[in-house]
Image (cartoon, grey):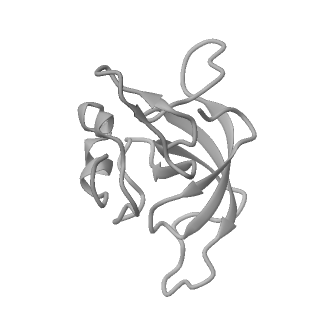
Amino acid sequence: MIQAQTLVNIADNSGSKLGRCIRVGQGYQNRWSSCGELILISVQKLRKKRKFKPKVQKGEVVRGVVLRTKAKFRRKNSNFVQFHENAIALVNAQLRPLGTRVLGPVTRELRNTKFMKVASLSGGFV
């Protein structure tokens, strides 16, 4: 689960490496965010090896979709899924991915949401 002030890894090739969650999802008094939800982040660190100009700058506020969380995620068939890191992929206002690749696997629940384009760019499903 991701809440405000959580540091998250950015798992795409948009040029950023680390971000901090500012706001969680939509709605009133939402406290935590899980896999497949939209959050608002501030870019904290950029990648060192940049062949091209990054698509985001340090300190910029952008949207991101949660790909992986450290907290256990329960599926409908009573299985639990857990990862070693909190990871997100950056998206624009139209919910299209900013990067052209997504690094690492994503959860299978991302397939049935409006972020299918992000899921198809990933390395695989868990």
Would you say 101 lies left or right of 7 here?
left
Q: Outermost residue toward the right?
A: 5
Residue plotted at (63% across, 81% down): 48
Q: Outermost residue toward the top?
A: 28
Q: Position of residue 68 (x, y in %)?
A: 48, 45
Would you say 90 lies left or right of 70 here?
left
- Reply above or below: 52 against 115: below
- Reply above or below: 33 against 83: above
Residue plotted at (48% across, 66% down): 14
Would you say 29 lies left or right of 104 here?
right
Q: Position of residue 57 (x, y in %)?
A: 64, 65
Q: Quadrant of the N terminus?
A: top right
Q: Position of residue 16 (x, y in %)?
A: 58, 66
How many numbered discs sit on the rendered protein? 0
Residue plotted at (49% across, 83% down): 52
Residue plotted at (35% across, 42% down): 107
